[in-house]
Image (cartoon, grey):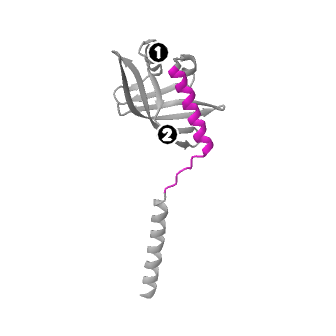
Amino acid sequence: MKSKVIFHTLLLAVLMTISVAAQEKKVAVTSPELYKEIERADSIIFNAFNKQDMVTFKAMFTEDLEWFQDNGGLISYKTVFENFGNTFRNENKLSRELVKGSLEVHPLKGYGAIQIGSHQFRHFENGKEEVGTFKFLMIWQKKDGLWKISRVVSFDH
């Protein structure tokens, strides 16, 4: 009887240890260097966007880009850049700014990084400024030392 109690006590202790270990959150830590690299890449891509520099802007995306938008679904690479071309030719001059304090960067093992944040878009229409703030998630791929966006999820429109 005594050995049964000891066995059950040990079994319970092992199960509790396994349970606690399973509940530990194993999150890869974002290094300050990675955060700065993605912050810089975001700045480069959206400076190009704001200047309507399609060559620099387009070069920041992989050719297998998948762009998901809550109100547009999955948008192909070709359509994405046709849409941006139309936007750049529009006289309303759309501009984008990252919302301060919203940037999150998470390492993506063996691939690159996940960027999450909010950004604000502005343009003038009918004589008044229109402003919209939206959320996004971008998957950045680092290949041959270059950062490019391979996936975009744009939502909360």
- Does 151 appear above or below 52? below
Horizontal and vertical percent for residue 134? Answer: 39, 32
Determine whether, in the image, residue 2 is placed left or right of residue 148: left
Asked if residue 46 is among those painted magenta in the image, a careful observer would answer yes
Horizontal and vertical percent for residue 129? Answer: 37, 22
Report the predominant secondary structure element of the magenta stretch: helix
Q: Residue at x 44, y 27 (%)?
A: 67
Callout 1 secondary element: helix
Q: Which mark is first along the chain, 2 or 1?
A: 1
* Mark 2 Cα-neighbour bin, 10 Å: few <14, some 14–19, many ≥20: some
Residue 26 seen: yes
Which residue is more in the foreground, 101 or 116? 101
Q: Which residues are magenta?
A: 25-50
Q: Which residue is mark 1?
A: 88
Quadrant for residue 86, please give it.
top left
Q: Which residue is mark 2?
A: 103
Horizontal and vertical percent for residue 13? Answer: 47, 74
Q: Amino acid at mark 1?
A: Phe
Task: Using the image, tell me which numbered label, if any, was put on residue 73.
Answer: none
Q: Amino acid at mark 2?
A: Leu
**Total numbered labels:** 2
Which residue is more in the foreground, 2 or 63? 63
Q: Residue at x 57, y 46 (%)?
A: 30
* Mark 1 Cα-neighbour bin, 10 Å: few <14, some 14–19, many ≥20: some
